[in-house]
Amino acid sequence: MDPTSFSASTLGVVVKTPGAHGFYTFVPAALPRRFSLGDQTVLLLSEADRALGRLAGAGRLLPNPHLLVRPYVAREALASSRIEGTQASLSDVFDATALGDETGQVREVTNYIRALERGLTELARLPISMRLLCSIHEELLRGVRGQERLPGEVRRSPNWIGSPDNRPETAIFVPPPVDEMHRALTDWERFIHEDVPIPPLVKCALLHYQFETIHPFLDGNGRLGRLLIVFYMVEQDLLPDPLLYISAYFEAHRSDYYDRLQAVRERGEIEEWTQFFLRAVAVQAGDAIRRAERLADLREQYRQAAARTRSRAGEVVDLVFENPVLTTNFVAHRLDVTPQGALNLIRRLEDGGILTEHERVPGRSMRWVADAVLGALEGLEPLPGG
């Protein structure tokens, strides 16, 4: 890490670790308890607040908003995992759920989904804290990393980011040593729950930046830090459900995302990072509203069609919006019917043009896909500014 690149002493200092083989590392300062916003930031904050409020309202007006939560969580999980290099698609994730087969890179995405669901459940009894995040971290790394990555435990040794030869000396960024890491985490936890005169979305941006800078785990810091955004918005009642998939914006602007975080460390550009974060919130909230409206329209259309069959096809419609890839075993298990009964219900939706049987994978179950639902989740054009 090049110490001459770091000039913002108010937000942290560069120190060299002791010993003959010492290397430079960045020790972040305590998070600011006051934050003056420039005019451009105030405008972006207002836009993000309005967009988030509209999304929260749309979520509350949906007949069954919980039906949309899992597909939205899947979008967030996929985008966050792609930032780290995962190549799975959204249909791969839904396919794995329907077939009960989580292998390879899909496992990292489904782990993220379970980690988010576990975190939301635990938020009912635990505040956001390192205790909570350690629990989520364990879920995030379950079955996909070796025990040397310490699932559920903070690191006990240095880590670094962006080294061509995996050495701290050549890394773009080296987080604080372990002792300083613990001091920074203490301040970070205190900041979460302090009543400071900082708008919640700005506070969320600061929390994410500081977590990524502290980098308290050997692996999974990026994904966990993005989960933190969802947890904070739900805990602060900014959203009733995790309907915002902000990682999609970070994925689409991956270089800017990393550059903005690094610019805070190197040059103190904290307001520029905050503007980037607020823009991401506004764009993704607007995108989520459009998808929610499209999905709500499709669900109403499909339920009306299913009602004419005088069967349990309406229950299969609900499953379609939870996971738009279905198999007979998946439907049979969820509705507690026989495989033949599940097939009959699927065929009713197929006859109605809701489901399409897709090519069978050799040795695998037949699968049916709700193409319009999958398209609403995958295929809408990005909003202006996205």
Image (spheres, rainbow, N blue to C red):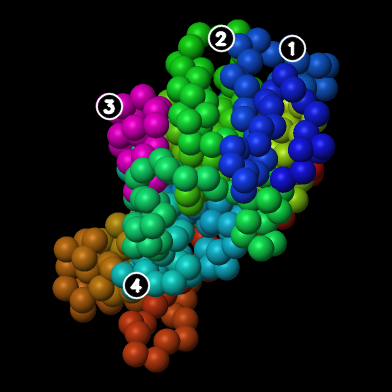
**Mark 2 to mark 3: distance in Å?**
23 Å
Foreground tag (1 vs 3): 1
| Residue that appears at 75% across and 15% down | 37
Dot 3 or dot 4: first in sequence order is 4
Q: Which residue is mark 3?
A: 125
Q: Is residue 46 left or right of residue 335?
A: right
Q: Is residue 149 magenta?
A: no
Relative to 384, residue 190 above or below = above
Q: Which residue is mark 1?
A: 36
Q: Residues within 10 Å of mark 2 (few under 14, many from 20)?
A: some
Image quarter for residue 246? top right
Amino acid type of the residue that numbered disc 1 sits on in the rendered structure: Ser
Q: Which residue is mark 4?
A: 101
How would you classify the magenta stretch by its main secondary structure?
helix
Dot 2 or dot 3: first in sequence order is 3
* Residues at marks 3 and 4 touching, judged by CB atoms closer than 8 Å: no
Amino acid type of the residue that numbered disc 2 sits on in the rendered structure: Val
Dot 1 or dot 3: first in sequence order is 1
**Mark 1 to mark 4: distance in Å?**
50 Å
Image quarter for residue 162? bottom right
Foreground tag (2 vs 3): 2
Give the secondary structure at mark 3: loop
**Mark 1 to mark 3: distance in Å?**
34 Å
- Residue 159: give x, y in percent of width and height: 55, 48
Q: Residues within 10 Å of mark 4 (few under 14, many from 20)?
A: few
Q: Is residue 46 left or right of residue 146?
A: right
**Mark 2 to mark 4: distance in Å?**
46 Å
Image quarter for residue 257? top right
Identify the magenta region. 120-138
Foreground tag (1 vs 4): 1
